[in-house]
Image (tube, coloured by chain):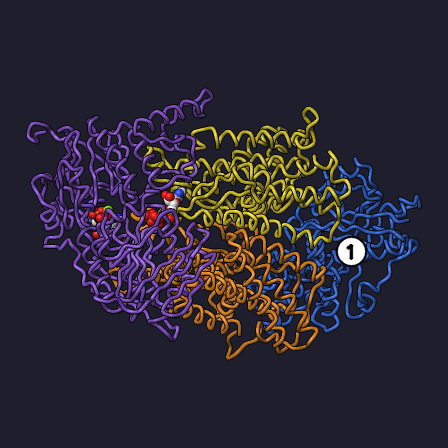
Chain colours: A orange, B blue, C purple, D yellow
């Protein structure tokens, strides 16, 4: 039962919307982390390192941006990491056998998208809770990938293809351009299209959304397919950046992506959050790891620190939202 | 003839264990036996390998060729096998307990030492070095890193800048390397505890248009290709294929009451661009050593 | 009972309570005497529920004092209120779905079993059975609450309140979801409680109940107390004027069309797994067609099946000359609107803003290019807020914070924006005050006058008789009869709707 | 929390749930094709292997009933397992080890409850955070190494038998009985139903939902502590990654077992069946030695199929 009095959102007094205020706090947090790291380490503020952080954040962001849409509908996609692995392996094989990067990229995106679509079908047609459905999918995908790769590594891709992940354009890494492009597209899609509005409405109350004439099932399919396609995109970036792929690359990608979404202020209950927030979430996560590397902090501390940051970020988010009343 | 050999490996994601499995299959086929592969569905999962042992004990294969996912935590599992009186050969990581017919493995320490020595020799005994470690606490990692460090100690001119874990993961190694390059303007050598991380580090160096000598360990196909193209300096050969072959051979020989060798520690080979050719053949086409060859290997 | 002779059982003095953007209660005083049924009246958003929440400690008043039997007390928590014997039956129930009736009644006060921490199962069932008997509710107390209907759940609520020896019972629109028969049961129970000296605060929008039950009436308007009167001293019209501060015509004037337009909706032999069969219905432009029957006769199911919200087994639905089938998005694109009976769970995204809720069905129409323009959305919402006189500080207010009537207007508003041609209302006036009611009917009248049509489900037969051109009466999932304008009387509806009458 | 539309739902006890069908089907299938499957020794195997998961899945059921989730359980189990190992190693006492493990587990559970109840952080987030913390602490206290050489008394817990029944099975049965009693026959159990079903009702009954929530999560942590002892006993050592990921298995077992994620509708027996279904599947596949990649996929398929069956029935 919804306790309105507790979840009461304030009347915005200024022109700034709640989301804008939250993003502002997050940017402040980013600046704070940057300031601390800059004081502790000389090389932190170098252009090279900043580009470095952005490039590293981009991979997390690609996965997390699609995931954001899923979470906005009050769903979850635990299979994104496994999806990246399978898509990368299949795309890699296609490039190897056909020699055509374009074909490979298309297969990678398609593979990711199809997996996402299957997730969507499980959630809509079979009505399995997304959390469970995508957990099942995670293992199915792992099984497929393991079988397909049979413990081998794919490696060695054409130089042109490798530019996507490791090339530069006017001094900026290409993934950073892609990041900006998809940040823009994602934000526009969520905020400035009717599909975006419908996705927010579905997250806020799926029953009411359906009875308001929103094609809920189709939108959910779209959202899961987009999430899958973004995982496919991430797999391409991964391939071209690392010049290789093996079956276990996905495992370490899922939780950071979810963490980025949550740190970015998207609510698991659906209907609240922004793609830009997710970008900042990815940035914060990457900055912290970067800082720990620069400061030579033992990696043993990394899970601990990440855990604390996730809790802190969400708590502060709730705090500031409440105080804004 | 027709014995079934249960082969336990750590995961289905690391190419190294694939070479072990192919080696075991080849040898079994050659000796008219067959293999059953047991691999945890979650990579390196201790509880799962323990469960698999329990299930296999029910199934009673003729013999077992066993790689523990953790050399200490799997001891109770080995004891279960012993209790069930199934002959078992230990390969790759030396189990901390239990009774084995034979141990076939490589010496991680000398592997790390030799490979690192090769890199330092190439650099003329000096330069700035970083180590990228594998999974903390895994036996292979501890010994390899110890070998790296001892090689560094022999070369006082070399300076260790950082030793950070990449968890045997390509992406993590790449990111660690990228970050380390920010705070260290000159890196001359990279000692990576496996090939995937070595290749990850190379990608990072390439991306920043910087050069350093990199070594890895395992002698995977990918590493051989990188050595061929001059990107990777060397890879310490862990000889997974031989481990699979010889482990299976010992198990089957024991069943057939032929003599076995109690311990074979494969000598490290540092694969470089001068000697990579024999390693450049597809796994399936490689041939297992004969017993005589194997006993020669053990003599060293 | 003379007011001067008896000290009030409970008295609230000068209570004020504000929420961001609204002053919900402004210097309200309220006295409750032993053994009386005190009706609390007011428009939607007048502050009735807020006052009761203050009374039971769920809300903290910003200012004001409480007196219990003449002594000053503090009520800062629900525990305080319980201590004073106050129990509340809310508009939303406070039952635990997967516990049985007995456990629900004695939640937190379970009889202890022999092993520490356990519940004495036999005693809790026996106690519950006894209690249910006293309120005349014949049911097995080990039935899980989740399987009960709304009315039955309400009875459990009342049993729970009584088990706490409540001396003051607050009921917030208790009959909103009850059938006539269930309502009679409830009234009988109230009479019995009253005889036992229990004081009852009763919030209702139904005039008939006010006069049937009330000993005294307090009227609120815009968070202020307007007056306290006795039913004998006022007429319904006077009461309404007090509530809305102006004259309201309670006869819901309608401009019945001389001859209805062409057929807009035709339902032929509709059968659905949800329990309706062989439904034949026709709705023409310019008409308001009633759909009546007892609660549970399947009216909601008909509405949902037409709208595509439930699957259909067989039959045909023709809308605007063409057959229609599929999900609600198809129906809504073709111009059908459903205003569902449970607006909170099915009609609104409670945590989103009024504006977001108002434009959600009209997105495709307002932004044919697919690109959303927030400013245009805002303007549309503002227009609807003005047109429907929705009481909200702004389009940015969270819709869950509006009063029930205004929430209902938002649900209707979203279909106006979408330009629907056929409006299916499921209990459109449930929980809605007289002022809003006549506004809503005026709105419906205008819509049909402009060529739209309406299919209206209502349990209030008076309303059906007043506003409908004709009506279908349902019984046990089938259409039991059809009543033309001239035949449309409460008597006829009841006769057709009763089981085997 | 969202107001769910009031839908009449049949009591899960009154229908045969998908999980029971799946379990029965698996047993019949493997009985027919897997050599050695239908032997007492193998059944004992499956049961023993399922004990650790049972100990996590039972409290997880209560946590999910409270509309919560505990993602930290696997990591906490890992940490407690290490604590058991380290403490029993240094004190030579199994009981002190168990005490330490349970204490650490309970502490983590309490922190989870505190984050969820008092700070109001969504359970997924709060426990994702503590997952990281527990994992980090495991690495730090062990420095990434296995802890070995612990006293035999610890190990005996896993290998000993009581009246011919392996002790882990006895422990799991006792735990199930305790949870069954707790959930269905105590006041606390009723309040757990109310936590997910209607928290307001608790408040009006003068009970503190926050305290109850903390208790539920603390119970989860405590059970992770007990399971940690079993894990240490099983491996005869402590290991910093031993239990990672078990929480998802536990959640899958709960979900497969028919506990819904809304409105406090929980079914303990279903959870047990869910755990067993996972155990039987893994065991059977090992016995027929299908390729390992098929085994990987099979658990996912089981989860999807069981929930799909349930979905079919609840719609029919
Ligand atoms: N928790 C809250 N936060 C903000 N505003 C509130 C809150 N609760 C009530 N209000 C506002 O206070 C006013 C009084 O609301 P209340 O619920 O008391 O009206 P009511 O008389 O019960 O109306 P109805 O007949 O529709 O139930 C309304 O304007 C409502 O929007
Ligand atoms: N959650 C529920 N649990 C059990 N029975 C229910 C539930 N909800 C509704 N019912 C019962 O199902 C039957 C059908 O109700 P439904 O609401 O469809 O009827 P209706 O004709 O639309 O009446 P109304 O709209 O006046 O409620 C009724 O007997 C009702 O009491
Ligand atoms: Mg009200
Ligand atoms: Mg109805």
Quarter where residue B52 is shown? top right
- C201 on left or right of A153: left
- B45 on left or right of C317: right
Image position, residue C224 (x, y; %): 13, 47
**Residue at 72 percent of width and 46 percent of height:** D286
Residue closer to the observer: D121 or D252: D252
For label 1, the crowd category at 10 Å Cα-Cα, with few meaning under 14, some 14 to 19 and many 20 or more, is many
Residue closer to the observer: D225 or A171: D225
**Residue at 28 percent of width and 45 percent of height:** C495
Q: Which residue is mark 1?
A: B20
- C285 on left or right of D283: left
Residue A123 in sight from this viewpoint: yes
Residue closer to the observer: B225 or A81: A81
**Residue at 39 percent of width and 49 percent of height:** C477
Does mark 1's beta carbon lie closer than 8 Å to ligand 2?
no
Q: Is residue A61 above or below residue D131?
A: below
* The residue positioned farthest toward the bottom in the image shown: A170
Residue closer to the observer: D260 or D95: D260
Quarter where residue D211 is shown? top left
Indicate the secondary structure of the residue bearing disc 1: helix
Count of marks placed on residues: 1
| Chain at tag 1 | B
Image position, residue B191 (x, y; %): 67, 61
Image position, residue A163 (x, y; %): 59, 76
Image position, residue B149 (x, y; %): 68, 55
Q: Is residue D290 above or below residue D97?
A: below
Residue A41 in sight from this viewpoint: no
**Residue at 46 percent of width and 41 percent of height:** D265
């Amino acid at each position: 039962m919804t306790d309105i009095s507790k979840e009461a959102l304030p009347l915005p007094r200024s022109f700034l919307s709640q989301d804008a205020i939250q993003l502002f706090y997050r940017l402040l947090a980013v600046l704070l982390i940057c300031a601390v790291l800059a004081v502790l380490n000389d090389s932190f503020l170098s252009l090279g390192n900043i580009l470095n952080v952005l490039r590293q954040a981009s991979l997390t962001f690609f996965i997390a941006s699609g995931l954001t849409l899923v979470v906005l509908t009050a769903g979850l996609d635990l299979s994104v990491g496994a999806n990246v692995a399978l898509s990368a392996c299949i795309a890699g094989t296609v490039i190897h056998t056909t020699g055509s990067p374009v074909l490979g990229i298309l297969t990678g995106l398609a593979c990711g998208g199809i997996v996402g679509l299957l997730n969507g079908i499980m959630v809509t047609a079979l009505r399995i809770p997304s959390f469970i459905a995508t957990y099942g999918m995670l293992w199915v995908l792992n099984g497929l990938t393991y079988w397909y790769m049979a413990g081998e590594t794919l490696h060695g891709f054409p130089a042109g293809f490798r530019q996507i992940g490791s090339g530069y354009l006017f001094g900026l890494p290409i993934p950073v351009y892609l990041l900006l492009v998809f940040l823009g597209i994602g934000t526009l899609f969520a905020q400035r299209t009717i599909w975006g509005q419908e996705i927010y409405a579905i997250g806020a109350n799926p029953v009411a959304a359906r009875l308001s004439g929103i094609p809920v099932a189709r939108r959910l399919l779209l959202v899961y397919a987009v999430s899958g396609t973004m995982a496919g995109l991430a797999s391409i970036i991964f391939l071209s950046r690392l010049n290789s792929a093996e079956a276990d690359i996905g495992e370490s990608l899922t939780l950071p992506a979810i963490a980025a979404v949550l740190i970015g202020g998207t609510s698991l209950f659906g209907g609240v959050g922004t793609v830009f927030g997710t970008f900042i979430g990815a940035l914060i996560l990457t900055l912290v790891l970067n800082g720990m590397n620069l400061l030579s902090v033992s990696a043993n501390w990394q899970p601990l620190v990440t855990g604390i940051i996730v809790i802190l970020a969400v708590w502060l988010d709730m705090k500031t939202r409440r105080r804004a009343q | 003839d027709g014995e079934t050999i249960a082969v336990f490996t750590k995961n289905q994601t690391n190419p190294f264990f694939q070479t072990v499995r192919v080696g075991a299959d080849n040898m079994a086929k050659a000796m008219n036996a067959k293999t059953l592969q047991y691999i945890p569905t979650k990579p390196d999962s201790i509880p799962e390998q323990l469960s698999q042992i329990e299930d296999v004990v029910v199934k009673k294969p003729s013999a077992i060729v066993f790689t523990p996912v953790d050399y200490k935590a799997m001891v109770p599992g080995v004891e279960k096998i012993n209790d069930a009186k199934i002959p078992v050969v230990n390969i790759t990581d030396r189990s901390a307990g239990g009774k084995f017919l034979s141990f076939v493995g490589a010496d991680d320490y000398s592997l790390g030492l030799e490979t690192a020595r090769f890199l330092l020799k190439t650099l003329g005994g000096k330069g700035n070095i970083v180590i990228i470690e594998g999974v903390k606490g895994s036996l292979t990692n501890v010994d390899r890193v110890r070998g790296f460090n001892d090689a560094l100690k022999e070369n006082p001119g070399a300076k260790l800048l950082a030793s950070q874990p990449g968890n045997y993961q390509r992406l993590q190694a790449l990111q660690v390397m990228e970050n380390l390059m920010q705070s260290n303007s000159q890196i001359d050598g990279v000692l990576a505890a496996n090939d995937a991380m070595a290749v990850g580090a190379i990608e990072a160096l390439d991306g920043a248009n910087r050069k350093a000598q990199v070594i890895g360990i395992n002698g995977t196909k990918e590493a051989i290709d990188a050595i061929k193209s001059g990107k990777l300096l060397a890879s310490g050969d862990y000889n997974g294929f031989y481990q699979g072959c010889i482990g299976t051979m010992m198990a089957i020989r024991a069943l057939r009451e032929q003599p076995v060798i109690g311990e074979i520690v494969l000598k490290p080979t540092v694969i470089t661009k001068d000697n990579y050719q024999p390693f450049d053949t597809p796994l399936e086409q490689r041939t297992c050593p004969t017993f005589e060859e194997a006993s020669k290997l053990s003599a060293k | 009972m003379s007011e001067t002779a008896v000290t009030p059982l409970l008295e609230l003095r000068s209570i004020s309570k504000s929420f961001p953007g609204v002053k919900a209660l402004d210097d309200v005083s309220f006295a409750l005497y032993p053994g009386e049924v005190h009706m609390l009246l007011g428009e939607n958003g007048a502050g009735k529920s807020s006052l009761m929440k203050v009374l039971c400690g769920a809300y903290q008043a910003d200012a004001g004092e409480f007196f219990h039997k003449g002594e000053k007390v503090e009520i800062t928590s629900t525990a305080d209120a319980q201590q004073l014997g106050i129990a509340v039956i809310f508009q939303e129930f406070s039952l635990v779905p997967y516990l049985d009736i007995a456990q629900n009644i004695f939640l937190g006060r379970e009889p202890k079993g022999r092993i520490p921490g356990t519940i004495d199962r036999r005693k809790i069932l026996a106690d519950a059975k006894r209690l249910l008997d006293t309120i005349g509710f014949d049911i097995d107390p080990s039935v899980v609450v989740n399987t009960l209907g709304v009315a039955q759940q309400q009875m459990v609520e009342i049993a729970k309140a009584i088990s706490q020896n409540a001396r003051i019972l607050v009921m917030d629109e208790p009959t909103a979801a009850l059938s006539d028969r269930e309502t009679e049961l409830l009234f009988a129970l109230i009479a019995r409680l009253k005889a036992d000296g229990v004081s009852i605060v009763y919030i209702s929008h139904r005039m008939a109940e006010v006069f049937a039950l009330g000993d005294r009436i307090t009227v609120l308007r815009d968070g202020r107390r307007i007056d306290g009167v006795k039913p004998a001293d006022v007429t319904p019209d006077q009461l309404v004027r007090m509530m809305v501060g102006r004259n309201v015509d309670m006869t819901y004037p309608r401009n019945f069309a001389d001859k209805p337009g062409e057929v807009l909706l035709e339902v032929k032999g509709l059968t659905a797994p949800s329990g309706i069969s062989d439904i034949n219905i026709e709705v023409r432009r310019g008409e308001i067609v009633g759909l009546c029957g007892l609660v549970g006769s399947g009216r909601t199911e008909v509405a949902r099946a037409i709208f595509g919200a439930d699957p259909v087994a067989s039959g045909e639905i023709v809308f605007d000359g063409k057959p229609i089938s599929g999900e609600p998005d198809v129906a809504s694109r073709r111009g059908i609107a459903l205003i569902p009976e449970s607006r909170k769970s099915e009609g609104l995204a409670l945590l989103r803003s009024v504006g977001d809720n108002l434009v959600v069905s009209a997105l495709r129409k307002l932004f044919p290019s697919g690109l959303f323009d927030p400013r245009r959305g805002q303007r549309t919402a503002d227009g609807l807020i003005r047109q429907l006189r929705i009481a909200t500080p702004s389009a940015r207010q969270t819709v869950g914070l509006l009063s029930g009537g205004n929430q209902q207007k938002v649900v209707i508003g979203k279909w106006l924006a979408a330009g629907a041609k056929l409006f299916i209302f499921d209990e459109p006036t449930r929980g809605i005050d007289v002022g809003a009611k006549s506004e809503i009917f005026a709105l419906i009248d205008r819509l049909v006058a402009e060529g739209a049509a309406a299919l209206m489900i209502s349990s209030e037969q008076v309303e059906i008789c007043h506003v409908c051109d004709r009506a279908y009466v349902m019984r046990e999932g089938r259409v039991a009869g059809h009543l033309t304008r001239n035949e449309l009387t409460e008597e006829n509806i009841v006769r057709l709707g009763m089981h085997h009458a | 929390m969202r107001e769910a539309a009031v839908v009449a739902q049949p009591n899960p006890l009154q229908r045969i749930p998908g999980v029971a069908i799946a379990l029965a089907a698996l047993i019949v299938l493997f009985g027919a094709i897997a050599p050695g499957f239908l032997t007492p020794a193998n059944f004992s195997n499956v049961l023993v292997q399922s004990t650790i998961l049972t100990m996590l899945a039972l409290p997880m059921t209560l946590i999910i009933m409270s509309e919560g989730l505990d993602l930290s359980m696997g990591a906490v189990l890992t940490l407690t397992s290490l604590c058991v190992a380290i403490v029993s190693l240094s004190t030579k006492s199994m009981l002190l080890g168990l005490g330490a493990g349970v204490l650490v587990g309970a502490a983590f559970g309490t922190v989870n409850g505190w984050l969820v109840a008092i700070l109001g952080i969504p359970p997924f987030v709060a426990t994702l955070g503590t997952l990281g913390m527990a994992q980090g602490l495991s690495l730090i206290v062990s420095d990434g190494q296995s802890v070995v050489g612990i006293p035999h008394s610890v190990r005996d817990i896993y290998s000993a038998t009581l009246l011919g029944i392996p002790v882990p099975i006895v422990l799991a049965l006792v735990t199930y009985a305790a949870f069954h009693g707790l959930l269905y026959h105590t006041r606390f159990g009723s309040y757990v139903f109310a936590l997910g079903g209607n928290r307001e009702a608790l408040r009006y009954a003068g009970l503190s939902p926050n305290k109850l929530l903390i208790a539920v999560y603390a119970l989860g942590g405590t059970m992770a502590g007990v399971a940690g002892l079993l894990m240490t006993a099983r491996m005869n050592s402590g290991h910093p990654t031993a239990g990672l990921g078990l929480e998802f298995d536990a959640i899958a077992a709960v979900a497969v077992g028919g506990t819904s994620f809304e409105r406090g509708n929980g079914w303990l027996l279903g959870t047990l069946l869910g755990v067993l279904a996972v155990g039987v599947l893994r065991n059977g596949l090992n016995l027929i030695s299908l390729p390992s990649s098929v085994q990987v996929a099979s658990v996912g398929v089981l989860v999807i199929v069981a929930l799909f069956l349930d979905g079919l029935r609840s719609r029919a």
